[in-house]
Amino acid sequence: MISVNPLTRTTRLHGRDRELLTVRRLLDAARSGSGGGLLVTGPSGMGRTALLECAEEGAHDLAVLSAHAAPGEGRLPLAGLHQLLLPALPLLPRLPRAQRETLARALDTGDPGEALPLANAVLGLCAEAASERPLLFRVDDVHLLDAPSREAVAFVARRLTHEGAAVLLSARDADPDRLTGIPVLRLRPLEAGAVLDLVAEAARDGCPEGLADPVAAALAEAAQGNPRAALELLEGTDPEQRSGAAALEQPPRSRGELTDAFTRALARIDPASRLALVRLAADPRAPAAPVLGTDPSNAGAHADAASGAGAGSDRSGPRRDAADTGGAARSDPPHTVTGGMDPGGDTPADPDPRAPCAPDPWAAARDAGLVSDPGRATAFTHPLARSAAYHRASPAQRRSAHLDLARAYAAAGDTGRAVWHRALAEGVPDERVAAALHEEAHRAVDRDGHAPASLLHEHAARFTPDPALRGLRLTDAARSAWLSGDPARARRVLARVRPVPPARPVSGDAFPHRDRDTRVRDVQDRADLLRAEMDLRSGVAIDAFAHLGPAADRLARSDPGAALRVLLQAGEASCLSGDHERFFATARRARDLAEGATAPREADTRDGPRGADRPWDRLVLDYMTGKAAMFQGRHGEGAALLERAVETADRIGDPQALVLGGIAGLLRGDHLRTRALAGRAVAVARRTGAYTLVPQALEFLTYAEMWFGRLSLAQGSAAEGLRVSLESGQDNCASHHRGALAFVAAIRGDEDACREHAGTALALAGEHDVGLPAGLAAWALALLDLGSGRTAEAAMRLRTLARSGPGSGHAAVRLLITPHLVEASVRGGVAVRVDGAVETFASWAEATGQDTARAQVMRCRGLLGAGAEADRYFERALDLHASGYCDFEEARTRLLYGGHLRRSRHPGRAREHLRAAVEVFDRLDARPWARQAREELRAARGSTAARTGGGTGTGAVGGVDLLSPQQMRIARHVAEGATNREVAARLFLSTRTVDHHLRNIYSRLGIRSRVELARLVGG
């Protein structure tokens, strides 16, 4: 029996529920006495045998006659029948004498004699077996049976289905000539999820080092839904490839019985056709290439390739491969084509290279079933045929194919792919090839995204002879892997970046002007910078700060721009942790570095604009210094710097720049710009495959939506951000999104969800020392208390948050909680000193010029005031809300003002505001606040149900009389059928102002629709 590797042994069936159900119904029919038949067809490796084996396992209560055809017995007459009928031979005496003698003689001598008597005897024996108990008649790979057995099986299969038997056959294709009437079940390719499950199960059993998710996905894609292909491709990987540290070869290598079968078929193909197959396997989507062997400059290579030898061939000794340089994508030793060979057979001689080439290079391969021409595009019929054609070819054949492809792409104007194939053809370190691949990697970002770019950077490192430059390119590969959302691969690639000793420059050095010792230091500094960036998103923030500071000092002299970006990451680390003193110091270092970089130096004339004159440097400097000014209370200065940062980020257009611009916009209260920049960052990051930046951009898109009161949009952005954060290994970013989800849940009164998200965010924030998500989660819990009427608890929680330090709070949170802190302390009767916080908030609001923030300041002063003074503050707040963009905050102001008016014995005016608040809270599904508004409304002796005027009620008429002149003009235009935009144009108002007045009109009249308004005003 053939020993099967653990990686390719048959595991339980995945994705075949429908097929298994069909087989179970067939067995049930046999048990009921009716019987039936089924022919399972499909390409090699699709699972025909596995399905039949599952059927036999489920037929424990049935008699079973089973045979599995073997290719080696195809020329042995009656070998198949002998295997099939052996268990039933004890029943032979029950047959009539003629049948008994015919069958016994045939099985003993191998002479089938007349076909019909033998087939009838086999049918009789099977019927005897089915008469005792239900029978499973199972034959696997009918097409491989010897001819007499195949004829007899077909005869029996068409007649036994009425004898209480289940006939289950498998073949590569249907056989209408012999098996007419037998239902056919064609096995289709598995869904991607089923292939992934299969590969994961096999890896758990046979790969102790594990299998990286992206690698599993790549193998599943290469398998094209074929389960056996997926398993043999998995076996073809090495531990480094399975872990993701080294890139998969293209096409991926496979090992196993089916791959060997394709190798034997390939060995029988003529040399020219074999070269065409290698070229097709190397790049199935390549443009038309020059005819093989016609380029005089490569004639020798083609001749050597046809014979499997040539310059640099393995026959004269081991050929130096790029793997010798310590590169990433290591190749196994090449295989030479040895010709067709069956188990136990002899190896035939290689085909004669002098044999004449076929006019059609695909004819022989097509006849062998290796390729087909769907839609006039030649393609392999099986994924393992492609793998075998490439990896079982000789090095000379692969080199010849890549040279052909390089010329084809060069002729088509695709220099990137031409360079790629030229590099694979050379196979030895070459700086010119490495530099071309490196440049192509940068171009690939916009075209294909960061994941393919990471592979190109890795291959560039593979061909780089200089160790220091190789380390820099490996770092680029790791950065692209990190940006693509694969932090595990990024860390594994970074693990291969090691310190290199200084050495003499080599010929072809890409940076002859740069001091070599500096470049050696840059390797480790840039690798450390990337590690710190990843720690910033997934580890202890302050640890990232500690690693970044020294790296900035080392880079300051050689590359001030890079040093400035290091300081940006250090500042973000300290700010994320809530350690603002360190952030202020880092911002000062950034400013000093930028000022020092403006001094003219020789390098400046070579590297372009100096210091802060470069857009990215200007963005970083304005962002950091503006943020520091805001947190230090210099709000006017900070707003101006952050506005400049927003404009610079908008011009740069890079997703990382757009994220910084979104943060700057949020800090200066420009939520419209924040929403636009963050949304654009998400779109660009998705387009370029920078998935790591997607959840970062979604953070600030979520905050902008929350500010506008768009709770559903905020919840959707936060939920997506949480999912992508977890998928890309960004735990700290996930905490931000959990805090935002807790905030939305608090507004909607979903206490369980709020506490779950906030608790998880607080727990991880405590472990990683990140103060911003901790502050957001604590704020959400305070808001939950405030909405539920636990005002004293909310005040205490907010007072603690206002005094929080590093690791538990953040300056932005301490600023923005001010309106809630004032409300909770006043309503809860808790003595909290809020005057200073209100003045700071007012200074920030005036600096931003945002009306909603200024309205919140007026609301705070109204809560802290009394009598007519409080009324004036509340009325001013509502005027500011009219030109703002946050319905939720306006409704909260109306709720608090309505409560104040009720307590001041103005129930009619109170009801006006409370009804409007109820309407908004209901629309936003802000249940706790709607409940509070209804309670206040009941206390003001009003109705929580909107009145529906019929046009004749006294209440309705009185309501129309109470409208102000401006409200009456708007009401008449709306009653005539004008839209809000049309009314705004007629009265020279903003649409927002018309919306505001129309809500007040509905509230005063106790109506909800334009139809009711038309009845009232028209009447």
Image (spheres, helix red, strand yellow):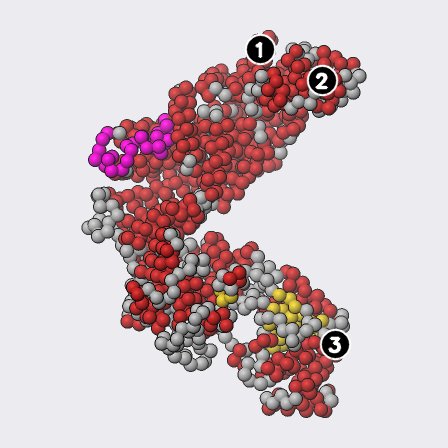
Expressed as whole percent of the image width and height from the top left, the position of residue 914 reads 66, 19
Residue 189, picture quadrant? bottom right
The three-letter amino acid code for the residue at tag 1 is Arg
The three-letter amino acid code for the residue at tag 3 is Glu
Instruction: Pick out the residue farthest to the right.
Output: 952
The residue identified by callout 1 is: 872
Residue 837: in sight, yes or no?
Answer: no
Q: Residue drawn at (74%, 76%), measured in percent from left and top?
A: 163
The three-letter amino acid code for the residue at tag 2 is Leu
SS at mark 1 in the image: helix
Expressed as whole percent of the image width and height from the top left, the position of residue 659 reads 44, 34
798 lies left or right of 419: right
Does the segment drawn in magenta span residue 607?
yes
Which label's residue is closer to the chain start, 3 or 1?
3
The residue identified by callout 3 is: 163
Which label's residue is closer to the chain start, 3 or 2?
3
SS at mark 3 in the image: loop
- Structural distance between the alpha carbons of marks 3 and 2: 83 Å
Near mark 3 (Cα within 10 A), the count class, few <14, some 14-19 or many ≥20, is many
Please report the bounds of the magenta region as a residue range: 599-625
SS at mark 2 in the image: helix
